[in-house]
Image (cartoon, rainbow, N blue to C red):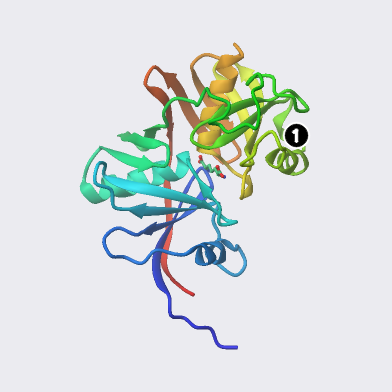
């Protein structure tokens, strides 16, 4: 069977702490992928492979708009690590040290900080219906095994505090919580161990993507849930499988600081 290689779509592969992304620049009149192409590109055997695809689009009010897609083709309202990757890319392009990116949840200020990139991911969502949950329950004692916390960062998170994150059965519990009816739009799941008042260990099961080496919006959710429970200060370091993120929950939002990396660029032929 011959393949119809009529699509010719330039892309860039990047990652933040091993949370890996295909970045596509759809600004101007450039081609953008449809959902079938996104799913095909996300296949780690027959495609490129990614945890999320970040699509850059023109925006009138900010430097650019960014939309995020999971490997199953579903859209994510927030993706902290991809936001940092796109911020680095566009800051280099504009020879700037700061910019603003519009994502589904609003305009996010981004800055260069030495070798690292930081982004203000905004304030956590307090309203259960906006997270969204399916009913009004206590956000830091959800009626689920382990009484996890619910945090909205533009996307839903379920933060489960455990004794030992390394031995937590995330491949088993993650998908169960992802699909629990309490989360009508499914959820990302973080397994968290408090190491001290400024340090946490996090492992992640992502909605629509499975186990990932890091999750930036999840790290924000972890910092928020741990502080709300009185376990940590507002500024923490989070140790993820792929490296460390620094989180600071300030009056103007949750700031996240961490590294970004360029891997390769290519052209998708579909
Ligand atoms: N890796 C991303 C989060 C992706 C969330 C996505 N799986 C969803 O459906 O919300 C991050 O760094 O924030």
Question: Could you tell whether 267 is left or right of 74 in the image?
Answer: left
Question: Could you tell whether 60 is left or right of 83 in the image?
Answer: left
Give residue 32's position: percent from left, percent from top: 39, 63
Question: Could you tell whether 125 is left or right of 32 in the image?
Answer: right
Tell me what residue is drawn at x 54 percent, y 66 percent: 36
Question: Could you tell whether 252 is left or right of 206 in the image?
Answer: left
- Residue 175 seen in this snapshot: yes
Tell me what residue is drawn at x 34 percent, y 45 percent: 88
Q: Quadrant of ligand 1?
A: top right
Give residue 262's position: percent from left, percent from top: 41, 53
In depth, the one of 100 and 267 nearer the eye is 100
Sort mark 1 into few (<14), some (14-19) or many (20+) by Cα contacts within 10 Å.
some
Location of residue 145 by image quarter: top right
Q: Is mark 1 within 8 Å of ligand 1?
A: no
Give residue 170's position: percent from left, percent from top: 73, 39
Tell me what residue is drawn at x 65 percent, y 18 percent: 138
Q: Is residue 44 above or below residue 162?
A: below
In depth, the one of 196 and 63 nearer the eye is 63
Give residue 70's position: percent from left, percent from top: 55, 52
Q: Which residue is mark 1?
A: 168
In depth, the one of 26 and 215 nearer the eye is 26
In this rendering, the count of numbered labels is 1
Location of residue 232 by image quarter: top right
Q: Report helix, strand or loop for mark 1.
A: loop
Outermost bottom residue: 1
Q: Quick one: quadrant of the N terminus?
A: bottom right
């Amino acid at each position: 069977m011959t393949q119809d290689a009529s699509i010719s779509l330039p892309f860039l592969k990047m990652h933040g702490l091993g949370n890996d992304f295909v970045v596509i620049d759809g600004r101007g009149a450039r081609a953008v992928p449809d959902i079938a192409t996104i799913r095909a590109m996300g296949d780690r055997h027959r495609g490129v492979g990614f945890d999320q695809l970040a699509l850059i689009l023109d925006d009138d009010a900010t430097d650019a708009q960014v939309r995020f897609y999971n490997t199953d083709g579903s859209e994510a309202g927030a993706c902290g690590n991809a936001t940092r990757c796109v911020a680095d890319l566009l800051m280099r392009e504009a020879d700037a040290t700061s910019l603003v990116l519009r994502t589904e949840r609003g305009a996010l200020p981004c800055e260069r900080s030495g070798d690292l990139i930081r982004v203000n991911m905004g304030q956590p969502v307090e309203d259960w219906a906006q997270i969204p949950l399916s009913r009004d329950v206590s956000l830091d004692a959800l009626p689920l095994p382990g009484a996890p916390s619910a945090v909205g960062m533009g996307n839903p998170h379920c933060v489960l505090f455990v004794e030992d994150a390394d031995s937590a059965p995330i491949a088993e519990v993650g998908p169960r919580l992802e699909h629990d009816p309490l989360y009508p739009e499914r959820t990302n799941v973080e397994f968290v161990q408090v190491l001290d008042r400024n340090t946490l260990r996090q492992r992640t099961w992502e909605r629509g993507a499975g186990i990932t080496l890091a999750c930036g919006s999840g790290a924000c959710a972890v910092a928020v849930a741990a502080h709300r429970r009185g376990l940590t200060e507002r500024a923490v370091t989070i140790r993820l499988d792929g490296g460390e993120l620094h989180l600071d929950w300030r009056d103007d939002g949750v700031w996240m600081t961490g590294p970004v990396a360029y891997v390769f660029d290519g052209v998708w032929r579909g």
